[in-house]
Image (tube, grey):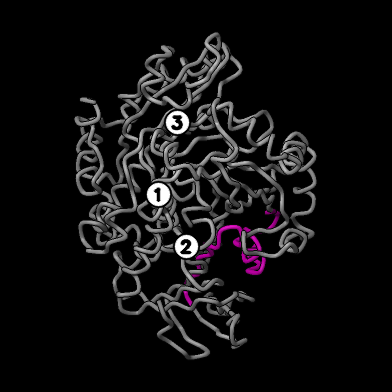
Amino acid sequence: MNTTDNSSESTVDVVLIGAGIMSATLGIMLKELQPDLTITVLERLDVAAAESSDAWNNAGTGHSAFCELNYTPERPDGSIDISKAIGIAESFEVSKQFWAFLAEKYAVKELQRFINHIPHMSFVWGEQNVEYLRKRHAALVQSPLFQGMEFSEDRQQIEQWIPLVMEGRDASQSVAATNMNLGTDVNFGSLTRGMFYLLQEKPGVTFHFNHEVEKLKRKEDGSWRVKATDRLTGQTRKVNARFVFIGAGGGSLTLLEKSDIPEGYGFGGFPVSGQWLKCVNPAVIERHEAKVYGKAAVGSPPMSVPHLDSRMINGKRELLFGPYAGFSTKFLKKGSFLDLPASIRAGNLRPMIIAGLKNIPLTRYLINQVRQSPEDRLAALKEYLPNARPEDWQLEIAGQRVQVIKKDAKEGGVLEFGTEVVSAADGSIAALLGASPGASTAVSIMVSLIQKCFKAQGASPEWQARFKEMIPSFGQKLNDNPKLLHQIRSHTSTVLGLADEETVASK
């Protein structure tokens, strides 16, 4: 993707800051809604999808809430709250519809192979956790979105599902697992690049890589002037736009602060780094085919839920375990150690202090993670793979995440896990903050953003019809319509090359 416009100043309809999954989704969606829109993409690195969207930096689960236990918390009365899981599962089905629409309409190789079938499983041990998983399963299977999920305490059955997890395990240990065969693995790096290739071929779209956004200024007419510097040449580029989207991953907070919109006041960020253990033994990789999630340690962030993760990356099967959390003051993997201190403002200092004081266990957890030795990491892996050998695994650096801290009238400041869209009252600028389950729910997030920031157009019959074309279930809840859910899943599975419900049920 090369720059096609060398002018130092230009005017477009839309500026997308950051070449990740969010900008790619928004950009291609806007061009489908209104083909004559002009768009400029500004990215600080030399390639697209090199930070949080990259396969090695992103958990890649295809967060559909099938196996992530942190999406189904236990209430004080012992019941299981499945509301968040249903919302995420709905959103992932919406994403698959949009991806299938693109794969059907455009012959781009990256859009034909970015998603693969892989079972999603939860695995726990100990009587209390087994009881929790039993109740979780009973609650989830009441929803059409989770029908077909299997639960078992039978060691032989679990061994058939995940043999390596059971080999060498204490026979007296009570264990349980759930299995959802409809699970997927998503390479969001490949998907992002595929969408940007599509966007590049469309008229009125320009890309500028190695460009660091230095300034955002609202003009008198309500539009924005975005000033960026070419990191290679030092040349300044100014782009005027009616709408600006800040989708720069961990770098979004700093850019939101530069916009100086009142809606952004009080937001802070808490960076969390990560590491993986990557399997380097092909024989071990070949014997495990599932995404196996467990329970997070008390006080740990949701993004640190341990999982043994089968992945397809660049056409090759991989096996990862982790992530192991850590702390860095960087907001991006390729960012600066000054990112955190530079983000502190008078408006967010109090919320950040209060949120920090309320999350002492998290701070303690991160410190302990940073201090882990190779033996400590192996011990954590052995809880999932009792026969794991150190020579079969090597440490890899994962992506950087920035959890949202925001003002709260009651609490003073709260640490949020998830994603948050912050937009100006006039809809002229919006920023996406936060992390998981971001990428998997990108389509739903961008539909909501468009409806909020492009109100008149979004409500028009023309755009409504195009939304329906891109997302056949648009305006309807799949959880309330099992027949429509079945039709949608059958279609997207066929287009995306995934196993459909009948095939899965017959296994």
Q: Which mark is residue 67?
A: 3
Residue farthest to the top?
Answer: 172
Residue 464 position, x and y percent, is 28, 56
Question: Contact (CB < 8 A) between labels 2 and 3?
Answer: no
Q: Residues within 10 Å of mark 3 (few under 14, many from 20)?
A: many
Give the SS element for disc 2. Answer: loop
In this picture, which residue range is highlighted in magenta?
Answer: 241-268
Helix, strand or loop at mark 1: helix
Query: How many residues crowd mark 2 within 10 Å: few (<14), some (14–19), many (20+)?
Result: many
Q: Amino acid at mark 2?
A: Ala
Residue 119 lies left or right of residue 426; in this view the side is: left
Label 3 amino acid? Answer: Cys
Q: Quadrant of the C terminus?
A: top left
Residue highlighted by disc 2? 49
Earlier residue among tags 2 and 1:
2
Estimate the spatial distance between the alpha carbons at disc 2 and disc 3, rounded to whole Å: 26 Å
- The residue type indicated by label 1 comes to Ser
Q: Position of residue 56 (x, y in %)?
A: 50, 53
Circle 1 sits on which residue? 444
Mark earlier in primary sequence (3, 1) = 3
Task: Looking at this view, name the residue that lies furthest to the bottom.
Answer: 7
Q: Nearer the viewer, residue 12 or 40?
A: 40
Disc nearer the start of the sequence (2/3): 2
